[in-house]
Structures are given as C-alpha cells and as structure tokens.
Amino acid sequence: MQFLLAFVVAAPLLGAVAALLPPPPGLKGRSPEQAVLRHGVTVTGVILAAAIALALGFDHDAPARFQATTDISWIQALDVRIHLGIDGISLPLLLMTALLFFLCALYSYFKLPAGPSPKAFVALLLVLESGTLATFAVLDLLLFFLAFEMVLIPMYFLIARWGGAQRQAAAWKFILYTLLGSVVMLLGLLLIGVNSGTFDMVALASDNGRELTHTTQLLAVLAIGTGLAVKTPMWPLHSWLPDAHTAAPTVGSVLLAGVLLKMGTYGFVRILLPVTPDGMATFAPYLGAFAAVGIVYGSLACLALARKGSKGDLKRLIAYSSVGHMGFVLLGIATMTPTGVNGALFANIAHGLITGLLFFLVGALKDRYGTADLDTLAGATGAALYGRAPRLGAFLAFAAVASLGLPGLAGFWGEMLALFGAFDPAPGLSRPAFLTYMALGAFGTLLTAAYLLIVVRRVCMGDPATGPDLAVADIQRHEFAAWTPLVALTVLAGLWPAVLLGLTDPAVQKLLAGGTS
C-alpha cells in the first residue's frame, strides 16, 4: 500500500520524462507522434490501475484513519517531511483524478488538439497529473503548497499552446490570478507552521487549533482561504475561469473543471476546518454568503448566455455553471456540520464526473460544427441532435439533467446535503443567515434547471431534414469509450450514494471532532 501510493504520485513524473525521450525501436508504430500518444495512454492507464488497487486494499472499516502512509524526513532545518497518506476524504478524489486523466489521454490519442509537439502535450499532461494526485495525497503543509503550485505551469501551456481563440490572454489571466492567490496562501501556511511548530497536517488536525491564538487563526483563514477561493473559484474571484475554459482545448477544460477546481475545496476541508476551527467559525457566515451569491450569479449568467440572440458560447456557459455548482460545495463547507461537509465532498465528485462529461460533449459538438456558439447551433436549422446524431443528443441530454440535480443521479445528493447542512448549521453560526443562504441555493437549483433545459431544447430539438448540413457524425468508438465510464459512475453514485458517503462520513466526523473518532 505504501509503495502503491508513492507510485501513483511519482509515476506520472517519470512518465513525463520518458515522453520527451526518443521512442525505442519497434515501438514507434506508424509514427513517433503515435508512439508518444500511446505512451500517455499507457502511463495514465497504469496509474489508474494502481489507484484502483489502492482502493481495493484500503481498509473500508477504518476510513477515518490515514492509510498507505509514508513519512520520511526531507528538509530537517524546516521539519519538512515527505508525508503521504489517504483516508476516506482523499481516496475518492484520487480515484476520480486518475480516471479523468486516463480518459483524457485516451481521447487525445484519437483526437489530439491542434498545437505544437505531441511529446510536449503528453509530458505536460503527465506533470499536471502528478501535481493533482500529490495534492490529494500529501500530509505536509509545504508539500501541499508545492503540489498545489505544480499544476499551474502545465495548465498554462496547455491553454496557451493548444487552446483556441484568445488563448494567450486566457492563459495569462489564469496564471496571474492563481499565482497571486497562491502567494497569499503561502503566507498563511507559514503563519500556521511557525506558530504551531510543525507543518505536519495530521498533527495540526489532532491539535485542532489549540496551539494557535484566535488572531493567528483569523489571519490564517483569511490568507489561505483567499488562495483556495481563487482556485475553487468562489464569486467574485471567479473571472479567470470562463476565459480559461472557453480558450482551453477539450481535455484542458475537462481537467480544469473535473480536477483542478477540487484542489481549492479540498484545501478548505483538509486544512482550514480541522487546523483553524475558531477562525473558520468566524468567517463561515461570510463564506456562506459568497457561496450563495455565487450559486445565483452563476445560474443567472448561464441564463443570459442561453438566451436567443446573446451569442453565448456553450463552453463559457458550462464554465459559469461551475461557479454555481462549486457554490454548493462552499456552502456545505461553511455550515461546518457533518451533513454539509459530506454534501460538499459528494458534490465535488459529482461535479467532476458530470461537468467533465459536459465539456467532452461540447468539444465534440465544436469538432462537428466548427463552433460552440449557441445561436449558431440553434439557428434556423438547429443542430437537431435528436434527429441527426441521436446518441450524441442522448448523452448531452443525460449530462444536462444530471447537472441540474435530477434525483437518482450523482448531482442530486451533494446539493441536497449542502442545503440540509445550511438548514441546521453548526452551533454558534447564525441560523437565520444560513436559512437565507439555503433559500438562495434552492432558488439557484430552479435557475439551473431552467438554463440547462433551454440548452437541451435549442441544441437537441429541431427539424433534421432542413438546412444544408445534414451529415453529422454520431458518437464514435473512442468517444463512447471515454464518456461511458462517466455516465456509469454518475448513475452509480446517484443510485447508491452510500458507496461514497460510507467513505467520507467517518473521516468528516473525526475531522470536525478535532482528530478524535
């Protein structure tokens, strides 16, 4: 188990180095480009298999205990250790990350985005995977920061070199926003480490803030929370996200929504809730307010983009929908209750699966029609996917109803639990304020259903016999292979939520109890 976790974190880096080397004789296939793309599929597939083996070997009777741990001294002067471990909170995120990277590598093997060398693309993809997996596996504050920052450069280049229109401006906006947030976050992490005498996240969680004064906790939550909120992204620090999603290649959008946004909310749960509980209790009402506004704002922005004549880009619309969906995650965290935090963690996974599928589908639409402009897709002839490409239309309709939180699918449980948490927040928090946030969140679910149903009506319905463009390819085999696992897991999580909640709940109970079961 120790070896498996270390392998899962380190193997992508080794694979990235190997991707830049010349392929061995006999393994080139039809071309060196094909060989390096096959290498990306192989490496991410091996990592996914190792992550599944890790999950099978995980002691499901003790999900609150860190397992597969490695603890090695690294920088003695600063007491920084290579400390790895997983529990019921981090294991689902680790598995989802490994799955999405494998599906993106598989998709890219058949549909590589236009850009420079495939070698660089695969190497950047693997470096990005290593950073995201490490973020969910490390148990040292400084290592967490290094892993958190490790993803920025690969994602910047994926947007800037393989993206679409306005990719340079979007990439710069992404890197500047996240770097500025990270600088503030580093100050907060150092403040905790210096004042507590350790950077070990397990020891800090067990101490539950007793070594930190109230003022120190307030400053730490303000600094770290700002950096995490930018990555989440929380309204009003979200403005980099729509541009980045619109310009990114399909796999870049899938990974940005499915994995990178989760790093911010994971930091709230793993660091701020257990390490600075008093500071979080002070700022929780404000976090809840920002979350509630973000839910409504994201939904209204999507409604505006979905309106006829607005020239709304579908990728941009889904990006704004992420602002709303991540608002539910933040609202659940702000309640500081087991119900709310479990809902936040469930919504994290559901959003990764569903929004990742949506970005895959919009990328396929853009490939077929040459645009993601909603007015163009729903013009006089209409995309009419139900008639022209029925399986593609069915996948899009499924992803839309999953995203709006239809009961029986994964999107329902996280949002419902977050709202239940807001109905009865932790002692000491203002119940009238959180009831207001709950009402705004419930209103946001209605707006979400409205804009997603509008998108389905405009893109999927219409007369397929009209218009000059009658030949539209339906789902191809590689698309079916990349999308079906996301559909299956969305249904499984919706029908059997206990699979995920059984992992997260004991770990959340221990985390909120100050490290005691």
Image (cartoon, rainbow, N blue to C red):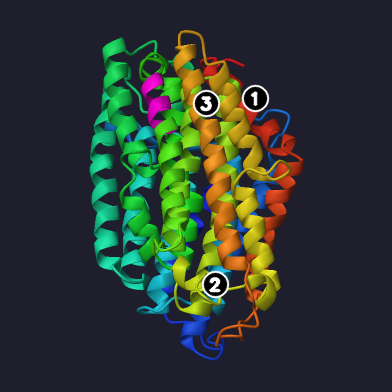
Mark 1 or mark 3, whichever is nearer to me: 3
Mark 1 or mark 2, whichever is nearer to me: 2
Q: Which residue is mark 2?
A: 364
Task: Name the residue at 53% across, 34% down.
Answer: 443
Which amino acid is tagged 3? Answer: Ala
Q: Earlier in the sequence, mark 2 or mark 3?
A: 2
Q: Which residue is mark 3?
A: 439
Which amino acid is tagged 1? Answer: Pro
Q: Earlier in the sequence, mark 1 or mark 2?
A: 2
> Circle 3: is it few (<14), some (14-19), or many (20+) Cα within 10 Å?
some
Residue at the extreme bottom of the image, as rendered: 30
Q: Which residue is mark 1?
A: 506
**Mark 2 vs 3: CB contact within 8 A:** no
**477 w.r.t. 490: above or below:** below
Element under label 2? helix
Q: Spatial distance from mark 1 to mark 3, Cα to Cα?
A: 28 Å
Q: Earlier in the sequence, mark 1 or mark 3?
A: 3
Element under label 3? helix
